[in-house]
Image (spheres, rainbow, N blue to C red):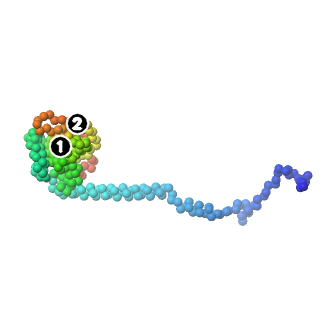
Amino acid sequence: MFRLPKSSSLSPFSFPQLQRPAYRSFSGSPKRPQYKTYFSENQTASSSSRPRPFRFVLRILGFGTIAVFAFSAGLSFQSFRTLNRIMAAPIPTNEETLAAFQAPDAWSAEIDATLRTHAEAEALRANPDFTEARPHHKIPETLRARSLTAGTLAGPGKIVVPPYVFSERDGKSMVSLMYLGSDVCGHPGIVHGGLLATLLDEGMARCCFPALPNKVAVTANLNIDYRAPAMADQYVALRAETIKVDGRKAWVEGRIETLPLDGSAPVVLVESKALFIEPRQAAALANLHKVAN
């Protein structure tokens, strides 16, 4: 059996500390050994090759700026081409628009004659404060097919004939007489509410345009109240009145009601209030009101 010497100060539970070899540099000071591994080298290389966050952000901003510039340039170019096409075409006078419509069939011709000779039309025609026109025929024929109410929704079964529009001077009021067919329904036999809203939006805008500095505006707010079902295949009248004008803003109220042929009281189908604002760049588009009106 091995026994520790009595003179030894070691106990069974104490062991001498192992001495690590000292490494010294050429200058004589202690220096820890440097170890290089394959993992650390690859980790350093991969870390240095990663793009920094701010570079990624700069790339996004750069590509975004290019995209916005390209979109704006394309939109401006298309708007410029459209404006040139509008201004290049001669704009008919009010009298010329009244004679421009050619009925495609006998039913359309009968509707056109009824609207033209209606008592409401005769009374407005005799009022010197009103001028008569068919504004849809002021839109150049090449662009008319791209218009919602003058092209897409116009024709037999829809807005059968171009409306007769009577405008009071200085944009005070307007009356539009039209016939709505059976192909513009939301429910069977009932005219779609969206079409009525579209007609009011367009009609009230046309009403207030002459009251604005540059005769053009866009819809800022439109409120619709439906009062009664608008039955298809009937004559209607759209009435609009400019309530207030303040600089580039115009407030307009309007309604669509039936246009009885027997002299009975009309029925209000839908009422509306709207705010129209003239764009700040409207001066550059001042000639467009000739088409709108």
Tell me the mark number nearer the camera, choosing from 2 and 1: 1
How packed mark 1 is, by other alpha carbons closer than 10 Å (few <14, some 14-19, many 20 or more), is some
Q: Residue at x 12, y 48 (%)?
A: 107
Q: Secondary structure at mark 1?
A: loop
Res 168 quadrant in image:
top left
The amino acid beneath tag 2 is Ala
Q: Which mark is residue 233?
A: 1
Q: Residue furthest front?
A: 188
Q: Secondary structure at mark 2?
A: loop
Measured as percent of width and height from the top left, residue 141 is found at 18, 55
Q: Residue at x 23, y 43 (%)?
A: 188
Q: Residue furthest bottom?
A: 26
Location of the N terminus (image quadrant): bottom right
Q: Residue at x 18, y 52 (%)?
A: 139
Measured as percent of width and height from the top left, residue 25 is found at 71, 64
Check contact, mark 2 vs mark 1: CB within 8 A.
Answer: no
How packed mark 2 is, by other alpha carbons closer than 10 Å (few <14, some 14-19, many 20 or more), is few
The amino acid beneath tag 1 is Asp
Measured as percent of width and height from the top left, residue 275 is found at 26, 41
**Residue position marked by numbered label 2 in the rendering:** 228
- N-terminal of the pair, mark 2 or mark 1, is 2
Q: Residue at x 14, y 45 (%)?
A: 164
Looking at the rendered structure, the number of numbered marks drawn on it comes to 2
